[in-house]
Amino acid sequence: MDKKRLLMLVEIAIFAAVGLVLDQVSFKVWAQGGSVSLVMIPIILMAFRWGFLSGLTTGLLIGVMQTMFGAYIVHWLQGLLDYGVAFTVVGLAAIVREPVLKAATALNKKKMALYIVIGTVLAGFLRYLAHTIAGAVFFAEYAGDQNAWIYSIIYNGTYMLPATILTAIVGVLLFTAAPQLMQRKL
């Protein structure tokens, strides 16, 4: 195995563990689930450092580890959506990887911030979408007389919107202050 691939695999493992820890240090919004944490930061960092595959893999590992440490699963498909898909899609923040790296190389912090926010909002929205689908399909009984989809949109929005905003703010502050975090070195 070459050094570059080995470094990537080691970083995926380390940042997945960091993501799990960051998710444990969270503000619980609802008793039924949903919290505001910085779990997306390591996934986005890996997406910017290494690209799609590493970002997706880091997110998937975080989701899998969460199922091992106290996930609430009522059906295998709900577990897949809430843990597997929801955290894996955060790695799609890599869609703005090239512009972020170009801005970092040029030391253009405004452009870096813009693309970091775009990537984070996209990642947060895709995660929110996975949680919303799982909520509407598998937790409809909590909606009472309300439409299950409206209930799930609002319920999941109450923690995903603040989590996405917090992640974007911390990501911008962290990555613009230390752009070398996004550059891999061998």
Image: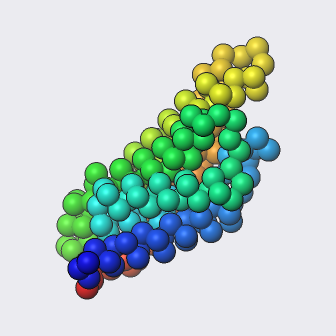
Question: Residue 34's x, y, as percent?
Answer: 68, 46
Image colouring: rainbow
Above or below — where is 2 with respect to 38? Answer: below
Question: Residue 110's x, y, as percent?
Answer: 31, 63
For the point 56% across and 34% down, which residue is it? 77
Q: Quadrant of residue 36?
A: bottom right
**Depth check, front residue: 38 or 20:** 20
For the point 26% across and 82% down, which residue is it? 3
Above or below — where is 142 with respect to 32? Answer: above
Left or right: where 177 falls relative to 166: left
Left or right: where 126 falls relative to 79: left
For the point 53% across and 59% down, which residue is it? 62
Above or below — where is 50 with respect to 140? Answer: below
Which residue appears farthest toward the bottom when viewing the image? 186
**Depth check, front residue: 102 or 147:** 147
Left or right: where 17 falls relative to 180: right
Residue 141 visible in image? yes
Question: Residue 130's x, y, as percent?
Answer: 51, 37
Q: Quadrant of residue 72?
A: top right
**Count of residue discs:** 0
Above or below — where is 47 with respect to 106? Answer: above
**Depth check, front residue: 155 or 184:** 184
Q: Where's the N terminus, which quadrant?
A: bottom left
Q: Where's the C terminus, which quadrant?
A: bottom left
Left or right: where 163 falls relative to 175: right
Question: Residue 91's x, y, as percent?
Answer: 39, 54
For the point 33% across and 79% down, which residue is it? 7
Residue 37 visible in image? no
